[in-house]
Amino acid sequence: MVSDGFRLRQLEADLDSERCLNQLGQRLNACVSAALTAEQTVTVPYTALLSQILVDVLSAAQGVAWAAVLLADDRHAPMDADRSATVVVRAVASAPAEAELPDALLGTISPTPLTVGQPFTARQIGDWQAQCPNCLWPIEVGAALVGWLWLAPAVDPSERLDAELAAYSDCLRSRLVAQSLDRYITALHQIELIQQQMQQQMALTNRNRELAQTNQLKSEFLANTSHEIRTPLSSILGFTHLMREQGFSPNNLRHQEYLNIILSSGQHLLALINDILDLSKIEANQLDLHWEPVAVKAVCQTAMTLVREKANDKGLALKLEIAPDVESFVADALRLKQMLFNLLSNALKFTPKVSVGLQVTAIENHLHFSVWDTGTGISDEQQQLLFRPYSQIANAAAGRDEGTGLGLALTQKLAELHGGWVEVSSSLGWGSRFTVVLPLVPIAPTDSNSIADHPMQTHPAQLPPRSSADCSDAVAPDAIALIHPESTPRGDRYPSNASKVVARSNHLLLVEDNIYNAKLMLTYLGKLGYELTWVKDGVAMRQALARSLPALILMDIHLPGEDGLALTQQLKADKRYQSIPIIAQTAMAMTGDRALCIEAGTVEYISKPIDLKTLAQLIGRYVEGLKD
């Protein structure tokens, strides 16, 4: 007959088991909930946390003195068939001092007690299980064995005196462990699903970020391409329109000048298209080099000849220096000439005085083609933008009327196709040196990060020496003014006497840095009876406003230094100039560009290539007293 004391002990054991399961469930659920609400950037060892919760709760249960969880490194690789597989202690609770374990088994554990991170082989676990079958419980996910729960029963002499109660306790403990493992494995699976979802979400977030960046680059590409194409097109269409209205005469010198402008603008447009195609071919791995022996001197002289006229126009000396031991090497002659032409053109563009040169030397197994100049130099911040397509550096010595912004990017890509790279040395006020380094013997193309492997450096000592006279500031052209030739000293941003100047109804101020487009406006609007003052930048604009207030301002947006939008906002913020209407004439023709111009303070917007008749009508809306 079962005694009341025995029933009481059974009831206590049952209640302790239920309390243990409830506590385990609550703590496991709290951990899973925390994983659901955690930020993606937070990395938490949830497997170790769940394992620690399991052993902490079980070690507090009746009849258990010690608990530990050992899991395989790869829970997706079953251990049954491989006894050499390794498991690692993930969590430990309590100590084995009062545990009911055979002495032989305790002697195999080093250190004692177990420590988190301690590894064991599946073979060791099997041996221990044979010695103490009631201590090790398999952890299985589906049909795969992924680890072990190690429990050491507590030693209770009073229980051991009652065999029936001991048997009941063993059965209850087995049921508790089985139910606990079910909840633990379910929580592990839930955490795994949450982590997979987080990884997918992070991958989607990164992909969306990449797509947004790609879309931004595409928009910048389209905007820059539109500007670079529309600018020469404006000259081509505008001067063609003038010649059609006037009736073309081959003997008319002015018409000959118009034709030269059209030809030059067309060549610029063709160069832009060719650069875009070349860059696209390189990035698509479709540009093949034609390897052949190249006479270095001949190619260098050809490149110098192509830029000589531009150098003569600016009064710059061209210098060529080739080391005596340099004669020929294997390369693509056409692409080498293209690289040298790009660098020489850039050097001339940013050099207002003295000279530009090309120096060729052989260093070890490479040829160094160095183009140097005595120009304004490039700051460290600007150097970071040099090899980005369509990135053009604002400089007082060069307007935006020439250059596609692709030359340096294309030069870098062509050098890499040859197995070489490009180096840069520059210092503000001391000029620049761009060096194309090519191997003497053709090798496989280097990776696209060659500039990172050969970082840009600034070494003024490598630049050509300059006399003290060369270091003086170059005089930048302020404006070509058809009226009021006197100049005003550069003082305040807007001279104080501007409010005293009386505006004339037929006087227009043209702010435009492209010489061909400016000449088109001067010619066409001059024939309509307007007097125009042409300036290239914000500084010259302020000087012109000090001399005479115009009836209307034609404002280009892409200007060296301050852009047209910023200048417009400054004018509209000054009460002396708020009443002067401003018309934006720009190559900006993307969606939203018109709204940007209107928001800045312009009254009208016209995109390049400019329709001259439409422009005349716009001006007529705001200017009175026009001449016939």
Image (tube, rainbow, N blue to C red):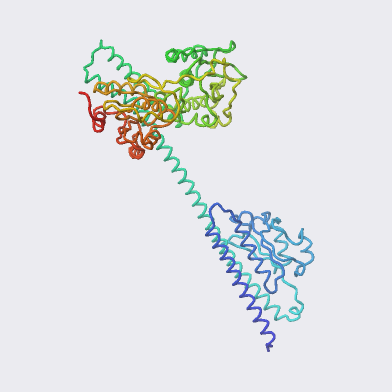
Q: Is residue 391 left or right of residue 55?
A: left
Q: Is residue 44 left or right of residue 611?
A: right
Q: How many marks?
A: 0
In front: 577, or 511? 577
Above or below, 407 relative to 601: above
Q: Say whether residue 549 is visible.
A: yes
Q: Which quadrant: the N terminus?
A: bottom right
Image quadrant in which you'd find residue 226: top left
In front: 60, or 216? 216
Q: Is residue 575 left or right of residue 108?
A: left
In front: 420, or 512? 512
Image quadrant in which you'd find residue 528: top left
Q: Residue furthest bottom?
A: 1
Residue 407's spot in the image, x, y percent? 45, 25
Q: Residue furthest left?
A: 628
Q: Residue at x 63, y 54 (%)?
A: 73
Above or below, 467 relative to 622: above
Q: Which quadrant: the C terminus?
A: top left
Above or below, 190 relative to 456: below
Image quadrant in which you'd find residue 436: top right
Residue 576's spot in the image, x, y percent? 36, 34
Q: Is residue 585 left or right of residue 423?
A: left
Q: Say whether residue 435 is visible.
A: no
Residue 135's spot in the image, x, y percent? 70, 67
Residue 131's spot in the image, x, y percent? 74, 66
